[in-house]
Amino acid sequence: MNVQQFRDTVRHFVDDDPGYLRWLTHHPAAFVLNTTRTPSAAYLMLHRANCWTITRLQPRATTFTGDYSKLCGGRDELEARARRLGGTAKACGHCL
């Protein structure tokens, strides 16, 4: 059986708004999986990196990576990560 090695290049941002915003600037064609602070299958929302819902603070929010965290990378990688968490990445209704 030939097993292909999977190289996980997903970045996880928690309590690091400057790092997250810098990552978005350098990866405008990538994707973001918005999830709970500790990633879980309970909430996995997939966005394009330029989606307004994850690039602007929402009303009453004071941080991007506080209550929610961001898994950032390629779409296939993030969907695979969602499956490993026991869930499915739900596509954002605004950008996907």
Image (tube, rainbow, N blue to C red):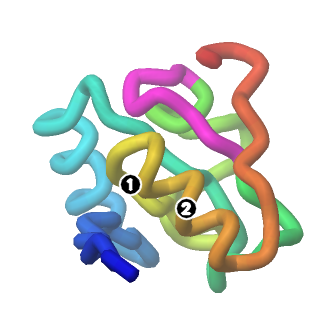
Please provide the residue range marked out in magenta: 45-52
x and y, in percent, of residue 46 in the image? 62, 41
x and y, in percent, of residue 74 in the image? 35, 45
x and y, in percent, of residue 31 in the image? 42, 38
Quadrant location of residue 88?
A: bottom right
Going by the image, does 11 lie left or right of 70?
Answer: left
Going by the image, does 77 lie left or right of 22?
Answer: right
Crowd class of label 1 (few under 14; some 14 to 19; many from 20; radius 10 Å): many
Quadrant location of the N terminus in the rendered image: bottom left
What's under tag 2, amino acid-wise?
Answer: Ala
Quadrant location of residue 26?
A: top left
Q: Would you say residue 46 sits in the magenta stretch?
A: yes
Circle 2 — which element?
helix
Question: Quick one: 20 or 48, which is closer to the camera?
Answer: 48
- Extreme residue in the front direction: 1
- Give the labeled residue for mark 2: 80
Crowd class of label 2 (few under 14; some 14 to 19; many from 20; radius 10 Å): some
Going by the image, does 88 lie left or right of 23?
Answer: right
Circle 1 — which element?
strand
Query: In the drawing, what numbered circle is on residue 85?
Result: none
- Give the labeled residue for mark 1: 72
Question: Quick one: 72 or 16, which is closer to the camera?
Answer: 72
Q: Would you say residue 39 sits in the magenta stretch?
A: no
Quadrant location of residue 83?
A: bottom right
What's under tag 1, amino acid-wise?
Answer: Cys
